[in-house]
């Protein structure tokens, strides 16, 4: 993505409440806030425009993050129809300040965003089916730029569920692939903006440590990953079937070790330097 200057306006001075966001040299605008303020959010003049919107929260059945992506020629009217859904507690919508988004444009954006949310695998996508629309080449290029701007602003507004776990490493720390070894098994991963990513085909021990019963978080996390199909049994051990992001290097190492682990010492580069040593060198 290109570098950008973001202008965020906190309507009440509170970053968790109603806020708007714009990018320099872009005709789009975002409005976001908590469900508790939906009336004020939808009372804004931006909500009578055409646009795409996001409803984010947690799936009540699984407890997993959940998201709904929608499009509307009048955002206000469509979002009000979703009040019967109780999973969402955050909302955001994007419109064009010059009012040049057509029905085909927003359907194109919706289809792309739904696909992106499903491919990211970070949340339950509650849309029943996909969407989308065919556009002339010039319009399609314009909407791809609009899509890029949405992706720049969404995480800033607190909705990170469309960000791919396996995004291309950018910073020097992210590009440095590390490994974690235990009992002849090997896992690979790298730092990420949200924590640490363990790469597909990495291995983990099959049995948990006895000490894990006292601090069961690694057991619970391993169970969740198994249920999601991200951690599968193969050849007497566990294998990651896809890239998985953890909140920290220690959380990733604990799942691999089957119990508590210090990620700063468990993860090493090809020269045997620990993550702790590497961070000391970098600083």
Image (spheres, helix red, strand yellow):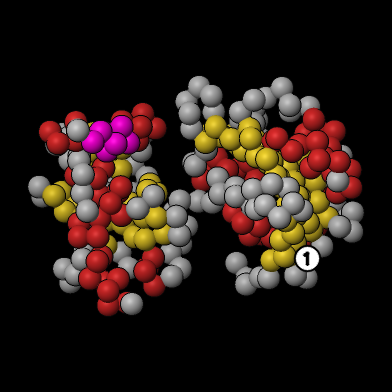
Quarter of the view holding residue 28:
bottom right
Label count reads 1
Residue 256 screen position, x and y as percent: 23, 45
At 81% from the left and 40% from the top, the residue drawn is 40
At 45% from the left and 60% from the top, the residue drawn is 193
Is 49 a magenta residue?
A: no
Height in image: 170 above or below 181? below
Q: Which quarter of the rendered picture does the N terminus lie within?
A: bottom right
- Span of residues in magenta: 215-221
Q: Is residue 196 left or right of residue 275?
A: right
Residue 269 screen position, x and y as percent: 23, 67
* Location of mark 1 (residue): 26
Quarter of the view holding residue 212:
top left
Q: Is residue 157 left or right of residue 281?
A: right
Height in image: 223 above or below 261? above
At 72% from the left and 65% from the top, the residue drawn is 7
Residue 273 screen position, x and y as percent: 19, 70
């Amino acid at each position: 993505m290109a570098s950008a200057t973001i202008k965020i306006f906190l309507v009440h001075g509170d970053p968790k409440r109603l806020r708007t966001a714009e990018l320099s040299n872009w005709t789009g605008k975002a409005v976001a806030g908590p469900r508790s303020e939906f009336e004020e959010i939808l009372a804004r003049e931006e909500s009578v425009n055409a646009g795409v919107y996001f409803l984010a929260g947690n799936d009540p059945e699984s407890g997993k993050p959940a998201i709904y992506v929608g499009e509307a020629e009048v955002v206000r009217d469509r979002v009000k129809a979703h009040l019967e859904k109780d999973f969402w507690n955050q909302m955001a919508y994007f419109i064009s300040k010059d009012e040049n988004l057509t029905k085909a444009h927003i359907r194109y954006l919706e289809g792309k965003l739904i696909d992106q949310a499903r491919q990211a695998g970070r949340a339950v996508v509650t849309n029943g089916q996909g969407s989308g629309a065919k556009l002339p080449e010039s319009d399609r290029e314009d909407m791809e730029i609009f899509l890029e701007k949405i992706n720049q602003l969404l995480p800033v507004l607190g909705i990170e569920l469309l960000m791919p776990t396996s995004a291309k490493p950018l910073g020097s720390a992210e590009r440095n692939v590390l490994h974690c070894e235990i009992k002849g098994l090997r896992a690979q991963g790298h730092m990420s903006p949200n924590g640490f990513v363990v790469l597909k085909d990495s291995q983990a021990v099959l049995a948990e440590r006895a000490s894990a019963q006292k601090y069961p978080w690694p057991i619970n996390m391993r169970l969740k990953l198994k249920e999601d199909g991200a951690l599968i049994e193969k050849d007497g051990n566990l294998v990651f079937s896809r890239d998985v992001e953890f909140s920290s290097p220690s959380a990733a190492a604990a799942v691999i070790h089957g119990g508590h682990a210090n990620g700063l010492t468990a993860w090493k580069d090809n020269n045997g330097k620990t993550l702790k040593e590497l961070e000391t060198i970098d600083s």
